[in-house]
């Protein structure tokens, strides 16, 4: 079964296949209750189906069409950002995630993906957005990823104690969410010798 997954390497969201027992790290493309028109909701659902069948360009068209009914819908904007990520167009993805967050800063799927891009750019505001996720999210995979990014940040700033604490929290949340920890193991190995 194909699912949409997030790369755990702390870089960027990509659409990939997951194993049968493996949960996606975050719900990349979702429907939510914030739709105000049936047309936009239906177009979002059609876009999701197209993503699941591998037709990113068709999905993008459906999400864009949905915006004609609801121009500030955070889900549609976030899903357009995810389409751009799948095509490695990080500038466009970042722009859509910013618009999604402006429309609804509580739509954490966009916040998680935006924070990933900022982290990859070594942008200092990535720390703010990862801390924001920690304050707002109840999703174990989102909490795990935010803690993992903050652990890397602490490690890169020679704060071994904070890095270890964040890393332990990340592993706890990611294990609870049944996420493959392969990408997190590198930091664990590096923390062994961190003084």
Image (tube, rainbow, N blue to C red):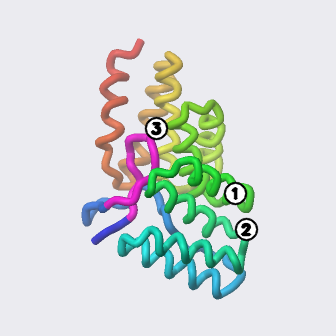
Closer to the N terminus: mark 2 or mark 1?
2
Please give the range of residues in magenta.
Answer: 4-16
Left or right for 16, reference 89: left
The residue to which callout 3 is attached is 148
| Residue that carries the numbered disc 2 in the rendered image | 72
Q: Could you tell whether 38 is left or right of 172 in the image?
A: right
Give the alpha-carbon distance from disc 3 to disc 2, as whole Å: 31 Å
Question: Percent position (x, y) of residue 93?
Answer: 56, 53
Categorize mark 2 by other alpha carbons within 10 Å: few (<14), some (14-19), many (20+): some
Q: Residue at x 61, y 69 (%)?
A: 76
In-image side of 119 versus 19 (left or right): right
Helix, strand or loop: magenta stretch: loop
Q: Quadrant of residue 73?
A: bottom right
Residue at position x 49%, y 73% in the image: 59
Based on the picture, tell me whether residue 160 belongs to the magenta stretch: no
Q: Position of residue 55 (x, y in %)?
A: 40, 72
Q: Residues within 10 Å of mark 1 (few under 14, many from 20)?
A: some
Categorize mark 3 by other alpha carbons within 10 Å: few (<14), some (14-19), many (20+).
many
Frontmost of labels 1 and 3 is 1
Who comes first in sequence, dot 1 or dot 3?
Answer: 1
Which residue does the numbered mark 1 point to in the structure image?
A: 99
Task: Return the x and y of residue 4 as percentages of the image width and height.
Answer: 39, 63
Asked if labels 1 and 2 touch by Cβ distance under 8 angstroms, the answer is: yes
Q: Position of residue 79 (x, y in %)?
A: 55, 65
- The label nearer to you, 3 versus 2, is 2
Q: Residue placed farthest to the left in the image?
A: 20
């Amino acid at each position: 079964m194909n699912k949409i997954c997030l790369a755990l390497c702390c870089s960027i969201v990509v659409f990939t296949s997951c194993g049968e027992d493996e949960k996606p790290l975050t719900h990349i493309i979702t429907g939510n209750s914030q739709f105000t028109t049936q047309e936009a909701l239906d177009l979002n659902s059609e876009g999701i189906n197209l993503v699941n069948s591998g037709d990113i360009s068709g999905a993008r068209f459906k999400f864009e069409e949905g915006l004609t009914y609801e121009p500030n819908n955070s889900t549609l904007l976030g899903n357009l950002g995810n389409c751009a990520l799948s095509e490695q167009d990080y500038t466009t993805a970042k722009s859509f995630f910013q618009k999604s967050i402006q429309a609804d800063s509580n739509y954490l799927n966009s916040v998680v993906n935006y924070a990933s891009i900022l982290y990859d750019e070594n942008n200092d505001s990535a720390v703010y957005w990862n801390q924001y996720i920690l304050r707002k999210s109840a999703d174990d995979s989102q909490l795990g990823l935010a803690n993992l990014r903050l652990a890397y940040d602490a490690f890169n700033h020679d704060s071994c104690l904070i890095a270890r604490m964040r890393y332990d929290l990340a592993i706890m949340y990611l294990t609870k969410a049944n996420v493959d920890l392969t990408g997190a193991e590198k930091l664990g190995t590096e923390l062994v010798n961190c003084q």
